[in-house]
Image (tube, grey):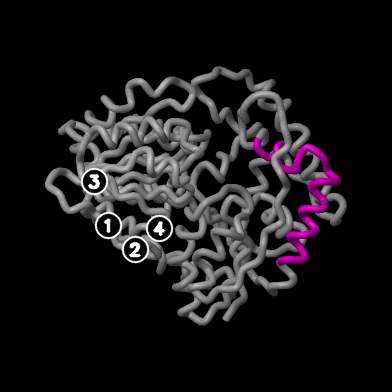
């Protein structure tokens, strides 16, 4: 049996841990030891202690200011330590020592490019365990992440150059061959793209292997539906959602029984929107049960929640807060299974959009079509396939 390390470097909230937890449980049942390196210790303490897993704080770099929003994956790297080889070396050394400390034979990387770089210096196999946003297409330079803004390839190449230079400086430091592109960093033992092609953040990725989604982690409580008639709605919001107050106002005014999972909601915000038909919860809610009972959902477009409701055939109103969520929201809207509110524009149309999502037969039919397309693709099978592949790599 093998020691494995789950590496999570970029991102926040419970979605990363929750998405990996079913696989971690299955690997443990097979006798493997799964250690966790997590970007958010508060999320880990909330879930992993109860699950009996060992976890450590991942080496991370505070975001460094750059002009304008990120335009490519390389641009993201430059904001988190890749602009300076010295900064990056410190992160890589920390990852190397963490890998050695856990005795890992394989690293399972969830949006953890620096962990991947560390595995290259150690000549250790790695498995990608990420959504499309976390794994750029194998293109040089890494492509434009804002396709609605035309960018010349020369500009994208200029962004990539310093990130690639830092990566290659680290590889030279440890006596390893340089890379030809940033995307080459993701050439690993197994490229596990979670999710489905319709929901890939890169619409023009090209041929790729999608493994599907894992079962829900089942760490939440049953949704506390208000006892009143009407279509049930579910909301998953955070303060990072630019339009969370507009969303709460729309839910209050619509008057339908609604469960609102809002983990960082201040008391004053809950008091402001208190209503008999709105049930707030700061503790995780069982998404599978919520998706089964709800007519529709309004969320901030996280990968796990969005996919869960679509696999249940439920339409969505999405209120994204940052680029990854915005790209996901665009893909849902493109297949007609929901609507989204642009975080950079006023939320004046949010209430009408919510009502339309709840009442539209076309949007409901498109969400149901997605669910039916993948109904014969049991998520439990995905776990078994991943376990077998990881064990092949370990042997």
Q: Nearer the viewer, residue 63 or 385?
A: 63
Q: Could you say which is closer to the camera, residue 170 or residue 261?
A: 261
Closer mark to the observer between disc 1 and disc 2: 1
Give coordinates of residue 264: x percent, y percent: 48, 48
Which residues make up the magenta segment?
76-98
Mark in the foreground, 3 or 4: 3
Q: Secondary structure at mark 3?
A: loop
Q: Indicate whether residue 25 is drawn in magenta.
A: no
Percent across and percent down for residue 30 are 48, 79
Percent across and percent down for residue 174 are: 85, 56
CB under 8 Å between callouts 2 and 4?
yes
Q: CA distance from mark 1 to mark 2?
A: 8 Å
Q: Which mark is residue 221?
A: 2
For label 4, the residue is 284
Q: Report the residue marked by disc 1.
A: 224
Residues under numbered marks 1 and 2 in contact, where contact means CB atoms less than 8 Å apart: yes
Is residue 242 or residue 63 the one in the foreground?
242
Calculate the distance from the C-alpha at mark 3 to the C-alpha at mark 2: 20 Å
């Amino acid at each position: 049996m093998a020691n494995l390390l789950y590496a999570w470097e970029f991102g926040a909230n419970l979605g990363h841990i929750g998405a990996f937890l079913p696989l971690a449980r299955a690997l443990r049942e097979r006798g493997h030891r799964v250690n966790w390196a997590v970007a958010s210790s508060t999320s880990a303490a909330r879930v992993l202690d109860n699950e009996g897993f060992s976890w450590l704080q991942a080496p991370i770099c505070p975001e460094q200011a750059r002009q304008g929003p990120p335009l490519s994956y390389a641009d993201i790297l430059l904001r988190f330590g890749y602009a300076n080889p010295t900064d990056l070396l410190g992160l890589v050394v920390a990852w190397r020592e963490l890998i050695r400390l856990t005795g890992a034979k394989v690293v399972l990387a969830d949006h953890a490019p620096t962990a991947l770089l560390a595995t290259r210096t150690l000549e250790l196999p790695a498995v990608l365990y990420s959504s499309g946003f976390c794994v750029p297409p194998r293109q040089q330079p890494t492509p434009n992440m804002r396709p609605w803004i035309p960018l010349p390839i020369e500009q994208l190449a200029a962004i990539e150059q310093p990130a690639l230079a830092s990566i290659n400086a680290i590889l030279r430091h440890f006596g390893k061959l340089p890379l030809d592109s940033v995307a080459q960093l993701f050439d690993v033992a197994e490229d596990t793209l979670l999710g489905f092609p319709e929901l890939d953040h890169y619409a023009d990725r090209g041929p790729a292997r999608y493994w599907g989604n894992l079962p829900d982690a089942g760490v939440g409580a049953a949704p506390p539906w208000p006892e009143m008639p009407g279509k049930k709605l579910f909301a998953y919001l955070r303060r990072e959602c630019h339009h969370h107050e507009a969303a709460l106002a729309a839910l209050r005014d619509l008057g339908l029984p609604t469960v609102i999972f809002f983990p960082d909601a201040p008391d004053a915000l809950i008091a402001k929107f208190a209503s008999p038909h709105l049930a707030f919860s700061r503790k995780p809610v069982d998404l599978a049960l919520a998706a089964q009972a709800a007519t529709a959902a309004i969320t901030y477009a996280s990968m796990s929640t969005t996919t869960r409701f679509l696999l249940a055939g439920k339409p969505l109103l999405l209120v994204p807060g940052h680029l990854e969520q915005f790209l996901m929201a665009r893909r849902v809207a493109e297949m007609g299974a929901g609507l989204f509110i642009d975080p950079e524009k006023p939320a004046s149309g949010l209430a009408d959009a919510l009502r339309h999502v709840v009442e539209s037969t076309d949007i409901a039919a498109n969400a149901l079509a997605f669910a039916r397309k993948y109904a014969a693709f049991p998520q439990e099978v995905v776990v078994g396939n991943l376990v077998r592949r990881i064990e092949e790599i370990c042997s």
